[in-house]
Image: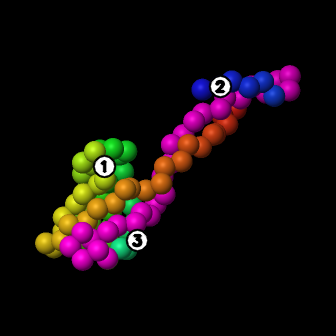
Amino acid sequence: MVSLSLGKCINREILMATEYDKVCTVTCTDNDKVAEAEVDRFSDKQFLDIFLAGNKIHMQYNGKVYVGNKMGFEFTTPGPKIYQVNRLRGY
């Protein structure tokens, strides 16, 4: 966290926030088809819940990628893109 002084009376803080894309690319390892999925819940390097064709798939991080199974198929993804965003908070 960094504090800034803008002018005489305004003091603001820069807060670093982590945000992620609401979509990610998912690959079916059984047939190598690639699709875009909607991200529901995400915890970096822990788990990822996605919606693919109306089906919710829970995926666990295995140290390289997120892996999940649904309807007898295995799916993998590197996960959504993660961004560091600067936000100003005034007081």
The quadrant of the image that shows the C terminus is: top right
| Magenta stretch holds residue 5 | no
Snapshot colouring: rainbow
Give how far apart the Cα atoms at labels 1 and 3 are.
19 Å
Which residue occupies the foreground of this view, 62 or 3?
Answer: 62
Q: Which image quadrant is residue 49 in?
A: bottom left
**Mark on residue 2?**
2
As measured in the structure, the alpha-carbon distance from the residue carrying label 1 to the one carrying label 2 is 33 Å
Residue 79 makes an appearance in the image:
yes
* Disc with the residue nearer the chain's start (1 vs 3): 3
Residue 66: horizontal and vertical position, in percent? 29, 54
User: Could you tell whether 48 is left or right of 20 in the image?
Assistant: left
Q: Check the image and report above or below for 5 versus 71.
A: above
> Is 8 a magenta residue?
yes
Q: Which residue is mark 3?
A: 36
Q: CA distance from mark 3 to mark 2?
A: 37 Å
Q: Earlier in the sequence, mark 3 or mark 2?
A: 2
Report the mark closest to the observer, 1 or 3: 1
Tell me where residue 13 appears, x and y as whole percent: 67, 29
User: Could you say which quadrant of the image residue 25 lies in?
Assistant: bottom left
Q: Nearer the viewer, residue 22 or 30?
A: 30
Q: Locate residue 28: give its quadrant.
A: bottom left
Q: Give the magenta-colored segment's residue range.
A: 7-33
Which residue is denoted by mark 1 in the rendering?
Answer: 64
Residue 72, placed above or below residue 89: below
Residue 21: x %, y % from top left: 48, 57
**In percent of the image, x 43 and y 56: which residue is there?**
80
3 vs 2, front mark: 3
Residue drawn at point x = 37 percent, y = 45 percent: 44
